[in-house]
Amino acid sequence: MLRAGGLVALGGAAAPLTGCDLFDRDKEPPAPDALEPLAAEALALEARYRAAATAAPALAERLTPIADAHRAHAEELRRVIGRPAPSGTPAAAGSASAPDAVLTELRRAEQEGRTNAARACAEAPAERAALLGSIAAARATHVEALK
């Protein structure tokens, strides 16, 4: 096989080269998806709940299902985005171990998350709005469950 000027000689006939170029510099990486921050936030909330359950074991039974819900939200958002989650799990900030303080911190995080999910829902195309509305509603429910 001889290669000259973008042609490959195969058995005496020349054929144009086709295929992908590993060094093609003209292609831009895909733009980040608008749901990336919400997916990252869901993983961060899961990590916070798991850390809180460890810091305040008396709350573990109450917090674990909410952590599991955040994990499910992150997985579904990643599926919609079409890209795997970044490797590693976000580290949760250390939280107070007094149950009341733990619940207060988690309520604040959920309220912010609910606001972010509602904003994303309002800005999303129709095919994503149902998922985002569901996540916003779940986060509102989490706020109530933490009272």
Image (cartoon, helix red, strand yellow):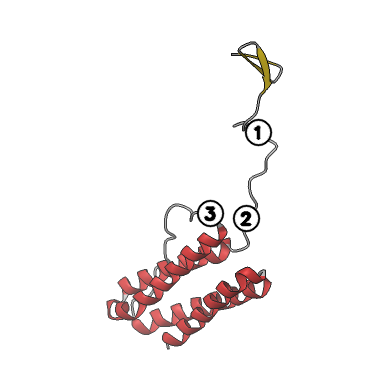
Residue drawn at x 47%, y 84% as measured from the top left: 141
Q: Amino acid at mark 3?
A: Arg
| Residue 16 or residue 133, whichever sits in front | 16
The answer for how far apart the CA atoms under marks 3 and 2 are is: 10 Å
Above or below residue 29? Residue 147 is: below
Residue 132 lies, in percent from the top left, at 57, 73
Mark 1 and mark 3 residues within 8 Å of each other at the beta carbon:
no
Q: Position of residue 60 (x, y in %)?
A: 31, 77
Horizontal and vertical percent position of residue 7: 68, 19
User: Which disc number belongs to residue 32?
Assistant: 2
For disc 3, the marked residue is 83
Looking at the image, residue 140 lies above or below residue 119: below
Q: Residue drawn at (42%, 73%), measured in percent from left and top?
A: 69
Q: Are marks 3 and 2 in contact (CB under 8 Å)?
A: no
- Labels 1 and 2 touching (C-beta < 8 A): no
Few, some or many residues within 10 Å of mark 2 (<14, 14–19, 20+): few
Q: Give the foreground label among 1 and 2.
A: 1
Quadrant housing the C terminus: bottom left
Instruction: Between residue 10 and residue 103, name the one nearer to us.
Output: 10
Q: Is residue 28 left or right of residue 43?
A: right
User: Alpha-carbon distance for marks 1 and 3?
Assistant: 22 Å
Look at the picture and state if 46 lies above or below 144. above
Give amino acid for label 2.
Pro
- At a point 46% along the width and 65% down the height, the residue shown is 43
How many numbered marks have been drawn onto this rendered protein structure? 3
Residue 125 in the image, given as x and y percentages of width and height? 67, 69
Name the secondary structure under disc 2: loop
Q: Earlier in the sequence, mark 3 or mark 2?
A: 2
Q: Earlier in the sequence, mark 1 or mark 2?
A: 1
